[in-house]
Amino acid sequence: MNQGFTKFTLMGYMGSGKSTVAQILGEKLGRRVIDLDDYITEKEGLTIPDIFETKGEIYFRRIENAYLLELLRSDQSFVLALGGGTPCYANNMDIILENSDSYYLKASIGTLSERLNKEKEHRPLIADLNEEQLTEFIAKHLFERRNFYERAGAIISIDGKTPEQIASEISHSR
């Protein structure tokens, strides 16, 4: 991992705690915190679900790539929480690796299933899935995304850890 980067990217599946850990890590390091989905929403004037609904996933993935590039090639220092799928599209993973210290917040299927089961009403993608379907959905996505996530500069296992412990592990790994 390049010790010279002033940008940190956190990646992982939905429910892995990227946004929460980013906030704590940002405070620890004295850095601005950016959530890529929030940044896209602000720039586009539409929520992510609205972008998907009105302009489609291809449009979303194109602008996601453009905004990721804009942020990571800027002169700013920050902690960036990525969307769960961000590393898996276009040349996003290469952009991330070339311009930031990257961390994969790796959670087991059991941990993700337990967390996401409690948040289903806030996550339209999984709102209609029962417990068994949710577990299968997570397992399928993790299998598809693993090769991207595991290219991160560091893999942080998060099972059984608090967001504070995870942020400390990241800040001490530098």
Image (cartoon, rainbow, N blue to C red):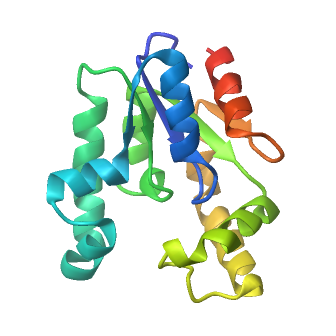
Say whether residue 11 is visible.
Answer: no
- Quadrant containing the C terminus is top right
Residue 20 picture location, percent across and down: 56, 43
User: Position of 69 compared to 145: left or right?
Assistant: left
Residue at x 62% of width, y 19% of height: 171
Residue at x 50% of width, y 78% of height: 125
Q: Nearer the viewer, residue 61 or 123?
A: 123
Residue 64 picture location, percent across and down: 29, 54
Q: Nearer the viewer, residue 57 or 111?
A: 111
- Quadrant containing the N terminus is top right
Q: Is residue 134 above or below residue 109?
A: below
Residue 107 picture location, percent across and down: 73, 52
Total label count? 0
Say whether residue 143 is visible.
Answer: yes
Q: Residue 57, located in which quarter of the rendered image?
A: bottom left
Q: Nearer the viewer, residue 120 or 151?
A: 120
Q: Is residue 48 above or below residue 168?
A: below
The outermost residue toward the top is 4
Q: Residue 4, located in which quarter of the rendered image?
A: top left
User: Position of 162 compared to 27: left or right?
Assistant: right
Residue at x 30% of width, y 43% of height: 68
Q: Residue 6, located in which quarter of the rendered image?
A: top left
Residue 127 picture location, percent across and down: 55, 83
Residue at x 17% of width, y 51% of height: 43
Q: Nearer the viewer, residue 74 or 50?
A: 50
